Image (cartoon, rainbow, N blue to C red):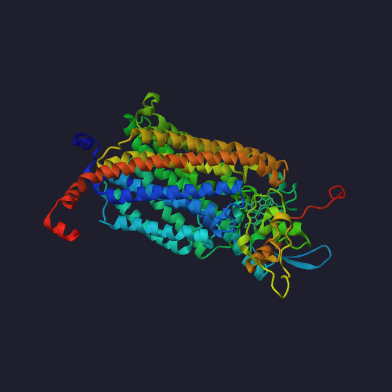
Amino acid sequence: MSSGTTASVRGELHEVRSGGPVLFLLASGLLWLLVGLLLTLLTGVKLQFPSFGSEFAFLSYGRLQSAAGCALVYGFAAQVGLGLSLWLLARLGGRALPGGGLAGIAAAFWNVALSIGIPGILGGQGTGLRWLELPKESVVLLFLAYLVLAVLGARLLFQRSNTRISTAQAYLLVALFWFPWIFSTAQVALVFVPVRGVLQAIIAGWYSQALFLGWLTSMALALLYALLPELSGRASSYSRLAGFGFWSWLLFSGWTAGSSLVGGPVPAWIATLAVASGVLLLIPTVLISLSLHSGARLGALFSSPALFLATASGIAFTGYGVLTALTSFRCAREVLQFTQFFVGLNQLGLLGFVGFSFFSGIYVAVPRILGVKLRFPILSALHVAGSVAGVGLAVASLSVGGWLQGWALQGGVDSVTVVRHLQPWLGLNFLGLLLFLGSQLALLANLLAAVVTFLLPLGKPVVAWVLAPTSTSGTKSS
Amino acid sequence: MKHGALLFCGVLTAFSASWWGLVAYPQRQLSPLTTYLGTNDAGNSYQYPNARSGEAVQGRQVYASLGCVACHTQQVRPSNGGNDIARGWGRRRTVARDYLNDSPVQLGESRLGPDLANYGERLGTNAFPLARLYNPRAVVTNSICQPLPFLFESRAIRSSGPATDALVLKGSYAPEAGHEVVPTLAAHQLASYLKSLQTSVELPEAPLPVVTEEASK
């Protein structure tokens, strides 16, 4: 690798100086992605062969599913999201990450918390509430680690060198403050001092919607707003649209919590509100989608993996928003409620929209931080193609399977038969996720090669020193 | 967006609105809910919901820790919002009061298996089929319900004779000769919890349907 090419990708100094903790967050996030996907695949095996590993309590379907969800949300999405958010804040604000090694330490604690928590779920300490299954000890660690990272991020935001806050920075502001708010509310009200009765279900629903639509979505959209114009070489001509999109998103996305409770044992207004806000969500979805895609050119799409992924993420976002709105209507809910359709929709949101956006960020951030280009375009191509095809297959199969399941349930078909008709679609979903998992190996290999390229020049003096036939080393080895 | 402070206030307002609306307000609305004291047609008074037995409460913990909620809901939708009642998962819709004593509440979001809100009622006076926990396929062909062999002990039959609660298993599920499969405490607790699941009690907010001649055919 010649120094000429490295200079062209070498980022600005503050990006590079923030690099250590960011790289650590990205790397550990990607490893948790593998863990989460493996656990998800195991649940898929159990749906075809329920007796697989059934002698072991830690391989129960329910525990595997909870552990997989937490690994994907808190291990992958949260960490990669935080890493890229800090990187983006440093870059947009023209400041280096403050706090010395503090960010790295917090990130390490985040991983310690998960390394206690995920095995804890498998061991039976889960709380039984969706995305809140992590046992108490690990929750406290997680929260403290987050606070440190968020305070550092907030400092980058408030000490930024630009006076005008960009759309991306606005979304990051939302993300930084939203998570501690919802996480502390949910943990206190559901785990530490549990509220009574169905209120638990209402708050748990509010939390999981807020976590996805508020927190993860904000981080993913921030990346898209920051990267798309740069990657496509065209500034969006709809910046006012982006502003309206931002505010309407903020306004409507917090109220869809009751959508999983339509017809459930909760006050009727909660479901009505969820239906209404679910439909209204179409407004920000359209506004944001238009402002994101306005600069798109089909021809340029294949020019870089980052651009392709960012565009795919935007499309997944549009799809997620539209499907959420359409399935808010009671007639759709009646059939689809409790089916695998929403499992598929979650995969579209988490792996498609959020995942692709984060991958795109990784393709931009890592080369800049290391000052090294990714060396194997073929691996990038494999990763992008496999990821997009994998998520596509996984989501499509559960969308179809979910409808079939819903109709069968409505028709009064017995559970065993419903499942038998669903199994081929679950199998396709399994294959999709397997493809997705496999393609992540290409990404990891590519990143590893970049890290090695980065380390080689640093390693040269060491290698030379070890190999040098000096008298001291000679006596030591004899 | 020029003004950071304005942006911050806007974001804060939006956040707190959804917090007040979906966390604080429901808490206010639902917290006065108490056990219902009523009188049935025969003139006897009753209260509902009754606290579950200690064994069933332990069983709820087992249920939550094994994640049965991944495939089983515990809620019956009203007859104008799904066919739960028509297919016999309950006689009336479930309401907030049904869950008053339960923590964690396991309403569930997925129905790969049947709803369990009234499983105890479906069992009626029958004992809970413990073999279903050991291996559901011993009871229902091709079931994908979760087998829980780790809640049972497979052991040689003791000299004092077989255990009274040893499972009666047939065919390929039967233990080898001279051995027996005995439920552990956790299996009994889980069974007791599942048997305690029933909601068919008249409440003012959720009356039981009047059984007509035709419907009871």
Check the picture and name the quadrant holding the N terminus of chain B. Answer: top left
Q: Which of the 4 image quarters holds residue A5?
A: top left
Residue beneath the point at 30% across and 52% down: A21
For the view shown, which residue lies furthest in the left direction? A471
Q: Residue at x 40, y 49 (%)?
A: A31
Specify whether A426 is left or right of A245. right
Q: Nearer the viewer, residue B59 or A143?
A: B59
Q: Position of residue A330 (x, y in %)?
A: 63, 41
The one nearer the camera, A314 or A206, is A314
Q: In this view of the protein, which residue sits in the foreground, A377 or A228?
A: A377
A388 vs B160: above or below: above
- Res. A443 visible in picture: yes
**Which residue is depicted at the point 70% across and 55% down?**
B172
Q: Which residue ends up furthest to the top in the rendered image? A: A299
Q: Residue A473 appears at what percent x and percent y?
A: 16, 57
Q: Is residue A136 above or below residue A415?
A: below
Above-or-below relation of A176 to A333: below
B156 left or right, relative to B202: left
- Residue A118 image position (x, y, % from top left): 47, 57
